Image (cartoon, coloured by chain):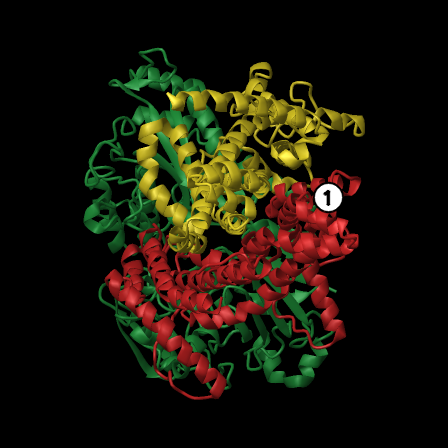
Amino acid sequence: MTDTVQHVEQTEASRSQWWDVWDQFKSHRGALVGLVIFAIIVFGVTLGPFIWRADPQAIPPVVEMIKQRDYRPIYTALWDSGAKVSWANPLGTDNLARDNLARLMYGGRVSIAVGLTAMVLSIVLGTAIGVVAGYFRKFDGPLMRTTDLFLALPLLPLILVASLLFREPLSAMFGVEGGTFALIVALIGITSWMQTARIVRGDVLALKEREFVLAARSIGTPARRIITNHILPNIMSPIMVSATLGIASSIITESALSFLGFGFPPDFPTWGRLLNDSVDRMVSYPERVIWPGLAISLTVLSVNYIGDGLRDALDPRIRGR
Amino acid sequence: MLTFTIRRLILAIPTLLFISLVIFLLLQLAPGDPMAQVPLTVPPEVKEKMRQALGLGQPVYVQYWKWIVQFFWIEPQVLIDNIFGTSLTEGKLRVISWQTRSPVMDIVYQRLPQTLWVVGVAYLVGILIALPIGIYSAYRQYSVFDNAGTFVTMVGFSVPPFFSGVLVIVIFAVNLGWFPSIYDTTHKVTDWASFKVQLNQMFLPVMVLALQITSQISRFMRASMLDNLNQDYVRTARAKGLSEWTVVMTHVLRNSMIPVVTVIALGIPSIFGGAIITEQVFKVNGIGQLLITSIQANDLPMVQTLTFIFAVLIVLFNLVADVLYGILDPRIRYD
Amino acid sequence: MNLKATLLGAAAAFAMAPMAMAERGADGHVNIIYWQAPSILNPFLSGGTKDIESASLIIEPLARYDETGTLVPWLAEEVPTVENGGVSEDLTSITWKLKPGILWSDGTPFTSADVKFTADYCMHPEGGCAQLTKFEGVTSVETPDELTVVVTFDKPTPFPYGPFVGGESPILQAAQFANCMGAKAPECTEQNFNPIGTGPFVVTDFRPNDVISMEANPNYRDPNKPAFATLTFKGGGDATAAGRAVMETGEFDYAWNLQLAPDVIAGMEAAGKGTAVAGFGPLLERIMLNNTNPDPALGPDERSVVRPHPFLSDPAVYKAMSMAIDRPLLVEVGYGKAGRVSCSWVPAPAAYAIEVEGCDVQDIAGANALLDEAGIVDTDGDGIREKDGVPLKVLYQTSTNAVRQDFQALIKQWWSEIGIDTELRNINASVFFGGDPGSPDTFQKFYADVEMYANTFNGTDPQTYLGNALCDKAPSPANQWQGENISRFCSEEYDALHAKLATTANAEERAEIAKKLNRMVVEGGGMIPLVHRGRLSAHANSLGGVKLNVWDSELWNVADWYRIK
């Protein structure tokens, strides 16, 4: 009975608290702009292909292919009237006459999905390990030595082994693309949590000796509550930074994995891969590197500003002002 | 703190042995073949003989034991020989690379200068730029400087070096011709003129690497400073009439250093690890390039040795970080 | 001419200097870049192209192939043949006469003892010699005098030019390597990094997997060569960067094997500092067809071992797949001037190449008609044909490489137009070409329906290469998945004809048999040939004397290189 009462009180309290958070978040200009841009990118890559219906993998028959390949983006016509452009391909076509805009949109689906999921996985893992190691002394040694071990493992052989052991079972479970997705996300997640864990642990070590934590502990607050109510809110900012940087490195790592052949099939576009494939032709076709590069940077920037706003909004000291 | 350090150092020995075993088993389990780069025109029977000559037919525990003995017993003796001119190791088998059939450690010594020049300098430059940017961005949050800094560092981090490296080569080496696109590892610095040549060839790779490092460290510095700038003790310090400089640079900075120290301590071993992609792009051929080529050629003794040295540095610098926590915040105790 | 110049002495050499040939070392420094870095300068311990070619600057064979594929004497006086009495009538022995007066770079004379030592070195059972096939069938190497070497074989050998011929089989100095026999071979670091040779250059500093510094050999047999006093051989990076360093920035003079798309090469050439040159050997890019069943449901002892493949064994299917491919377009997209349309397993030398009708035209309609006629039609309306209820879905794997991934995308599209569904996979080259029996992704295991790669052979004789389609060479668990018959093609008729080739000496008859074998595999469902690939290398416009050689080391005539002034 008392339990339920407490529960109800808590949800009421937290609802009004979240309302405050939203109010504060709204007043953060950068965060709002970031949110809008991020929303545009997400809508663009999820709904975009329903509006722009070009197939990112289809190659036209031979004669057309020769004619339609290497189109420049439509805006090149502004300064170069002789440029090979067409309204049918606003961002031009690649060297096999595939539509760049369609590839950019399809590529974004995978890149954003991989980037976000892998980032969440690595942040959750890193935070959990960091908090436990920092707060409970008896776990500190074993967990930090495990972290050292993971930091020391060479990435490429690790990927080879994981791909050898888990590729086929995962494909059987989730299908080829689902299995690849799970494998990539898991690989990036379990190879990138260590930095977060070390940072979180360092902060927790300092925090748990602060007066407010000691006070909470002295009145008998259980460890779980101290962690969720006092420790976690105070380590949000380094976690947010890790998260933003994590998205960028996950998107790039995905392209490296696919390039090495452990990721998605070769004709499956992702932002990192589009960028990678186009570096050789950077001088003749700058658009092929600019657009994917811009897409990755914009995603990371917008997430960064959203993170900034969230952190400010979650900080009670700032929220009051 | 001293007892803590000593205890951790002693504990590091079994940890490192365990790490070396895990790395060894991982490398054994990973698919791959040291004969992968031998052309298809060489028939399988010959390849099999070549594998036997490398000692691949032996059981795994024998191979591991051989490596342990060679690395922990013979290599230190070689070092003593080199320093004191003794001959303890004559005729003893050192850790031999499968690719080059030469002692692994000799190649590592050969590669260290260019790695330290390029990656080490980039790290130093990165930290020196990142700290002021981080501090000032936090102090003037949402100012023009802060926003510009955020933009540059975030774009800098989002653009992978396989792109930014080639981009600066196309601009500065191909079009402008200011810097070479290929690093000359045989270049020796003997006087001012050759030092300038060295600086010239280092410039592009250091720039590309430092951008990444700056981005990362300045973000953590800024976030951590922001957390501390609003704390009560800062208000107290200001109320006491301390100057802004003292408040920010001593009180706030010291308390904000913990995450930054963590990131830097994690980064220093990676100086030794080299920068794989940047080294490839500029042909610096340091430790990073050595590691990736040995992984591709399945040169297990080389990969094992490099990874293990890397592990030693990681364990060591994480210990340094832990000790630094205690100095930065005396309330942190480990005992 | 050269010999005469030597005899005439220094005065004559000076007199000639202003004409074409300068004196030794007059042209200063030359820079060569290989995007794969040499690890060792002893080709017997490595077998990698990068190592063989870098070593060819220093150590030389008795005879080698020139840019046309003709054998030319190098350290020998002439190439022994049956006609000039150098090869015995029964084809069991060959007698090499060495050029007199040749010195090693340390000043000691080069003798037949060095040649015999080289054979002993490689044939040592514990040495793990990478070039052992060069010495296949050799029973003894005799040295009747200082300048004569007699090699005896265990049976009549119609093509006795294996040992001591070509960049893979150069001569080592006996005095230097005497203590490096057998199991000791890998321990001789100093020798393996700084071999003493007869070639135009000597090593001054070798940094494995990075850079080699060399200078002109003071004891080189032609006193006017090489024209360059010093040489830097840089390794590492990637093909794009190497091409850029030669053709765009001009930092380097020669870049090896630029596997880049033609438009990328053209863009680099436009910078005007260098030229790309192509040469054609027997390298063929092909799609191998799996003759066994790669179904994952089969156990590890049966997958890719039991015959037949559920649908690829049907001639209508593989013929249609081949007809659907537009080879001229593949050449244009992927290789440009470094590629030619070919449907011959052995595309060169010309004597062994076959012509296949319809090779250079795409015929989607014809392919569809062929499949319809064979009764392989789409029965369930999903756009994919079925043969006996098995849908034509293929897994198409290859190594990671930009051009190969473009090919995969194109061919997938074409096959979709004839009702074949394709799933693509690319695998890291070091795993794909590595023979690790523990990995499911090697090209030998062939856990896929079709796979694409390129293969070639050394020298000009295809007999051993044609042996790659013999039944008993198929990889299987019994031989730890080692074996060159990747497609698992198997025909008694083929095996018998190949046995006949091994005993035929007449060149014309050999060519006739080889062509028949060639055609049997291409038309019998062993492979779909795609592109005859050339080697594309680039040299600076100021570097003269480059003759691209695909039959031997590319650096074979480095002694003749000079600076165009």
Whether C318 is drawn above or below B235: the answer is above
User: On the picture, is C284 further left or further right than C377?
Assistant: right
- Residue C107, given in percent of the width and then of the height, sits at 51, 86
The yellow one among the chains is A
Extreme residue toward the front, this view: A219
**Amino acid type for the residue under numbered disc 1:** Gly
- Which residue is at the front of the view, A209 or C499? A209
Image quadrant holding the C terminus of chain B, namely bottom left
Q: What element does badge 1 sit on?
A: helix
- Residue B14, given in percent of the width and then of the height, sits at 34, 64
From the image, tell me which residue sits under label 1.
B149
User: On the picture, is C486 further left or further right than B236?
Assistant: left
- Residue B281, given in percent of the width and then of the height, sits at 60, 53
The green one among the chains is C
- Which residue is at the front of the view, C7 or C185? C185
The red one among the chains is B
- Which residue is at the front of the view, C335 or A101? A101
Quadrant of the rendered image containing residue A263: top left
Local crowd at mark 1 within 10 Å, few (<14), some, or many (≥20)? many
Q: Residue at x 73, y 41 (%)?
A: B141
Q: Residue at x 68, y 54 (%)?
A: B251
- Residue C545, given in percent of the width and then of the height, sits at 62, 62
- Which residue is at the front of the view, C167 or A31? A31
Q: Residue at x 35, y 48 (%)?
A: C511
